[in-house]
Amino acid sequence: MKNSRILLVKRPVGMIAPTDFEKREETLPELEEGKARVRVTYLSLDPAMRGWMSADENSYVPPIPLGSTMRGLAVGIVEETKTSELNKGDWVAGFLGWTTFADVSAADVNVVPQMVPMDAYMGILGLAGATAYYGLMEVGKPQEGQTICITGAAGSVGSLVGQLAKAHGLRVIGIAGSDEKCKWLTEELGFDAALNYKTDDLEAGIREFAPDGLDLHFENVGGAPLQAALNNMKAHATIIMCGLISTYNATEAPAGPELSAIIKKRLTVQGFVMTDHLHRFGEFFEKLGAYMMKGQLKYRLDVVEGLENAPVAINRLFEGTNTGKLTVKVSDL
Ligand code: NAP
């Protein structure tokens, strides 16, 4: 039996090039005991692949080794089996790779029901659906009446997030890259509004749609659309960091912080303002006072004499010339 597979042979620089891959034709060996041979029917192409192709060791999956079959989520049909856990004719989904046949163990795949069209396992019942559902419901915890903004809104994840949000009674604004995509969002998917990030003023457009601010923002893109959403968030709102596709082919480090670690390491990044917690001061005094009395917390002051010196002294904070808590001694005790 003949197999074709595509190997990753070079790590892309910038956009992925056809020369980063090599095609291999081969005759398949006899199937090993304990495995099943799957004929791949649909292969999912995902933005995450750009990251998997890079040499970045500091991610949620190791880089694809050069010279090996390109990694990819796929669905297929069991053609031959030497394991009691998989039957001929089963539909299976998993990381089958860029290949026409894959030999798998039962643990490598999920057997999926056959009562929907098989291509659904590429979309709603695949990575995109699971991502949209988990991101919106588990991370975003949406509530009826809230307002959400979604970037990459006409894409496979974004379009599902928007529809799920509508089904949960939210007001939804999507950001996408063409008027045709924006029209699809509002006229066919039921989004309340859509903005074209190539032609519209995003910050003003979001503000017009949500004058009181956004309760939720689902980020797929990064860069300017993320900034426009950030500038329109309500206090205590939630940003669901799903993807940053605008940065994936970058060949130079961004001017600002590189935010992909938030996703790769599933970080919780939460702003806070101490004055929201002033009512807990008694608790802080008690805890910190106990540490101080035991000598476990030390502090030093950098005292400036005289109120008249405050206007000049304050800049020492920004020059770094304060050594300790910069304090003005206004009068004697
Ligand atoms: P997709 O949205 O179906 O396709 C990618 C879309 O991104 C393109 O159609 C394009 O739409 C937009 N795009 C590409 N380059 C852009 C740029 N420079 N600026 C703005 N938009 C750009 O792909 P998807 O599979 O649904 O993935 C969407 C996002 O979700 C990606 O960031 C992906 O990495 C992320 N994701 C995350 C997880 C997770 O587990 N965290 C899982 C799956 C996907 P426009 O025409 O609108 O520009």
Image: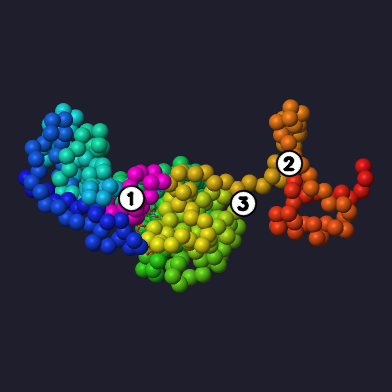
Asked if ligand 1 lies within 8 A of label 1, the reply is: no
Query: What residue does disc 2 label?
Result: 278
Mark pair 2, 3: CA separation: 17 Å
- Residue extending farthest right: 332
The numbered disc on residue 272 is: none
Quarter of the image for residue 249 reads bottom left
User: Would you place residue 211 above or below residue 32 in this image?
Assistant: below
> Camera-side residue: 50 or 213?
50
- Asked if 87 appears above or below 167 in the picture, the reply is above
Residue, disc 1: 52
Figure coloring: rainbow
Predominant SS of the magenta segment = loop
Quadrant of the drawing holding the C terminus? top right
* Residue 194 position within the rendered picture, expressed as x and y whole percent measured from the top left: 45, 64
State which region is magenta: 41-63
Residue 175, position in %: x, y?
44, 62
The magenta stretch spans residue 203? no
Q: Give the residue type that dot 3 points to.
A: Ala
Q: Splitting the image into four quadrants, where does ligand 1 fall?
A: bottom left
- Nearer to us in this view, 97 or 209: 97
Mark 2: give few (<14), some (14-19) or many (20+) Cα within 10 Å.
Answer: few
Q: Is residue 31 visible?
A: yes
In this picture, residue 202 sits left or right of residue 39: right
Question: Dot 3: what SS?
Answer: strand
Side (left or right) of 5 relative to 224: left
- Judging by the rendered image, the residue that carries numbered circle 3 is 235
